[in-house]
Amino acid sequence: MIQYAKIFTLMAGLTALVVILGGYLGGPEGAVLFFILAAVMNFGMYWFSDRAVLKMYKARIVGPEDAPQLYEMVDRLRRRAELPMPTVAIAPSEQPNAFATGRNTKKAVVCVTAGLLRLVDPKELEGVIAHELAHIKHRHMLVSTIAATMAGAIAILASVARWGAILGGGRGGDQNPVALIVMSIVAPLAAMIVQMAISRQNEFQADRTGAIIAGSPLGLANALRRLEESARRIPMEVNPAAAQLCIVNPLAGVRGQAMLNLFRTHPSTEDRIQKLQQLEREGF
């Protein structure tokens, strides 16, 4: 129920932002038009957000004939987690990373990057995949996926508002262009704040459950350290709106990261590693 309450809050937040933007651009008629647009976007985000996220990462769906070892590992671990078989996908990025998406356990997707498959050993890969399956088991991914899609949509609408102000758009020319430009800047920030509704505790929970699924916390702990180091060296072309889905921050090497850290949805990788090592000492 908590997850569905978060989804309702996120969608309500999107609707409010879009309607306000429509009111600025077109008055009452614009507000109504943008309300209809928000309704369509909400429907699309619930049903098709997983596909949108895969497109953001340029990922392709694979089967047992395309990536037999990866597919077998996902199948083995999902049976241990008592989950339906998720769709398996590979993103072409050289940065090692992974994420889960989908609206429920029957429509879930586990996606890894090509760089991850090349970097980590089998035990580390098991830890990463088990972590993503834990997100699916705890139903974290629907909120995360909708938030990512929402943030991308708000950024697009904000860009429309900004260019409308620059080109003199608005109802009857009586709009304050400064207000529109400010709003177009604030809207993406609001989208990032909405993403912060995703609890950082989800990552700790997924780490712990993932350790149980994999049979050890150390594979994931070792993988997290290597992934964090690689993310700082190898850039990933990804919409920042979808960055929070990844197991480690894919924008770690981006300039201005100190500002982006204000909006982090994940706890620090070092904190996660320490908790995983503590689990090992306690026999988890």
Image (spheres, rainbow, N blue to C red):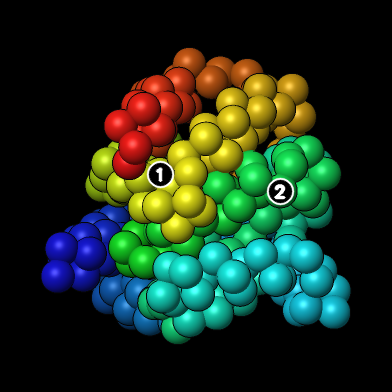
Q: Earlier in the sequence, mark 2 or mark 1?
A: 2
Residue 276 shows up from this direction: yes
Q: Nearer the viewer, residue 142 or 76?
A: 76
Q: Going 22% across and 64% down the picture, which residue do you hit?
A: 3
Q: Secondary structure at mark 1?
A: helix
Q: Is residue 61 above or below residue 26?
A: below
Q: What crowding class fits label 1: few (fewer than 14 Cα within 10 Å), some (14-19), or many (20 or more)?
A: many
Quadrant in which the N terminus appears = bottom left
Q: Going 66% across and 65% down the picture, which residue do you hit?
A: 73
Residue highlighted by disc 1: 207
Q: Nearer the viewer, residue 238 or 18?
A: 238
Quarter of the image where one finds residue 96: top right
Q: Amino acid at mark 1?
A: Asp
- State the count of labels: 2
Q: Nearer the viewer, residue 211 or 92?
A: 211
Quadrant in which the C terminus appears = top left
**Image location (x, y in percent) of residue 262:** 37, 24
Q: Is residue 234 left or right of residue 284?
A: right
Residue highlighted by disc 2: 122
